[in-house]
Image: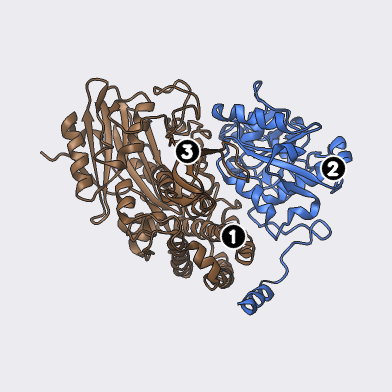
Amino acid sequence: MLLDILRVRAKQGFRTMAYPDGPPPALLERFAGLPVVDQDRCSLCPGHCLSSCPVGAIEKNGSLTIDLGLCLFCRECQRACPYGVLSFGSDHRLGSSSREGLISSGDGSPPLALNERAAGLYGQVFSLRVVSAGGCGACEADVNVLNTLAWDLGRFGINYGASPRHCDGMILIGPVTPNMEEAVIETYRAIPEPKFVIAVGTCTVTASSREDFPVPVDLYIPGCPPHPLTILDGMLRFLGKVKE
Amino acid sequence: MSRCLATGNMESFPISQVPVLPWDDFLDWIVDGVVQGERLISLFHRRNDIVCSVLADDSRGSLSVAMGRFDGRSYRALTPVCPQAHMFERDMAERGGPVPEGHPWLKPVRFPRGGALGSSVGDMDFYRVQGEEVHEVAVGPVHAGVIEPGHFRFQCYGEIVLHLEISLGYQHRGVERLFEAPLSAGQAIAAESIAGDSTAGHAGAYCGAMEALARCEVEPRARAVRCVAQELERVACHIGDIGAMAGDVGYLPTSSFCGRIRGDVLNLTASICGNRFSRGLFRPGGVLWDIDDSMAKDLLKSLARIRSEAADAVGLLWSCPTVMARFENTGVLSTLDCDSLGLVGPAARACGVTRDARHSFPYWSYRYRPIRVAVESGGDVLARARVRWSELENSFDYLEALLSDLPRSSVMVPAGELEPSSMAVSMTEGWRGEIVHVAVTDRTGKVEDYRVVDPSFHNWIGLATSMRNRGISDFPLCNKSFNLSYCGFDL
């Protein structure tokens, strides 16, 4: 028995990724990351991309902008553009510490995710209560996956806690359905000050602009669902643990 | 005249062909069908006086549809004679449809604002057991882990659970309304997020319904790519679940290996469409991404490696006597309970029931290249774990066969307009079980009624039943062995 475990263990090998000391894991060729827009060539058409976007994430006032907080990365716009102006690059860095930071002009620069205050407070341990409030389960899965041995979230000093009273903040997933509003507010109140809220997933980010959204958001991580690397990168840059 | 219209999976028919029966005949038709072994797979209130129902005959692979004309406000409930109807009747009443008199536990299902059964979420009479040493344990809606919200109440006598009542609705988003529109990209995107871990299952069922209504024949290669996506989804989730079950009994080798292997499978899906959850792959008319020959080769290579690693990781679990002792006879469901409650998916197949839409109502490639159905007996956690492993092996075989022989054709054809005043029933076998979408168009060809039944809709009561007379500490394990969806239920 024990020998079997050791044999399988040896075959499995060491799986925790080298990142952030080494390079981040290579993302797949068809991955849709930070959008890239060739603004110079974007004056040629009446805006097929605008009408193709199912969520109205694209605007054109002189130059073209994509709101990553609305974007589902479905690439309808890329397919609609006859001139190949728009594409989705391989950059996974999408997290932003401000909602405006998510308005991308497609120049290749990732949004700024650093929160000086959080970075100063949580050098060692950052404990988060994860609350799902109308998410479809996909973001929950990829938030959870960071706890597997390939990602090993704990080595960054970040963990998911069970009680909000023992946490420093909240990962919020989902647009906060009416039936979850009270639970979200109560959970938020139970977290001691100072506290930070991380909105994961496009539906959460989109809903956070609502006037009656029940909690203030400090870090926005868009994507439907965001890649685990996007979520991890957002949290690490938020805390100043990765600088670029 | 026949009492119903016979149809098949992913076929459309004019709504005028569906018989509209007097109310009592309609109820008799449902009860007669269920007594003869058919299953109630959809029951919904269409408008003021019309209720529509679909029955499935697994042995013949046929569906039958009928409508009932209802006058009044209430009727004699089906549930006491046909427990399969219990959730459908509550759902119908909550949405303002006919109220079932004599329903044993008529309470809200999703607690929508302004719902006809009233009360706000979780606020209802829970089943109560009285007596000395009886106590109640209430959990949720926010659970301790990274998981969707729901509220659970255990009535306990010491350690023993006499009854578990599950109250959901916290994730209720009103997603069905998003389909009541002309064919659009937004609908496909909504279908993808009905239950996030079942994207291929739900987006597939949506596409099946739309293509039937548009009379659009999907190309063979697109059918194969869809089956690849559905099987990859199944493989990823079953591996994750077996790992989670191992974790719940503290057997860490399998738990940690499986957690990682699951991610590798999700990455295979991402190599096809860029997204780990098949987002942006299924669209009416086909698929948006092709699997070219070199990609198929790479996928085959990765799958062979993953299969061997999964066999190692799960093999450790089977060879650990303490784990087996913990799984065996835990959370037992009888075949009788499974059938009367109308359970579906691996939970039903673990009770010895051959119930699999890929087998009984074959669609896409499953029609031309049948897939084996995994069935186990025992109805306990062990049987549910074993069914998952057998299904994994079947899925690996199927993926190998599909990917080494992809048909040559395009992967997308224009879907065209939807037929007016028509209806279609579309079933796929998601990894949790059978997914049913029913769509009805109006006179202009716009979808006017869209109903989704996720396997969780049937199976939550199975979890509650499996906990009866069990120790409360068995709950996490029983829960993982079902691993049901909250948002798929709450809609």
* Residue B230 shows in this picture: yes
Q: Amino acid at mark 2?
A: Tyr
Above or below, B440 against B349 in this view is above
Kind of element beneath mark 2: loop
Distance from Cα at disc 3 to Cα at disc 2: 49 Å
Which chain shows up in brown?
Answer: B
Q: Is residue B270 left or right of residue A16?
A: left
Colour in which the image shows chain A: blue
Write down the chain letter for disc 1: B
Q: Amino acid at mark 1?
A: Arg
Where is residue B432 shown, x and y percent of the image? 45, 52
Q: Earlier in the sequence, mark 3 or mark 1?
A: 3
CB of mark 3 within 8 Å of CB of mark 2? no
Q: Is residue A77 left or right of residue B191?
A: right
Tag 1 residue? B262
Same chain for the residues under marks 2 and 1 in the image: no
Report the residue that reaches farthest toward the front.
B132
Kind of element beneath mark 3: loop
Observer-nearest of B231 and A141: A141
Above or below, B205 against B290 in this view is above
Observer-nearest of B312 and B327: B327
Label 3 vs label 2, nearer the camera: 3
Report the residue that reaches farthest toward the left.
B1
Write down the chain letter for disc 2: A
Tag 3 residue? B132
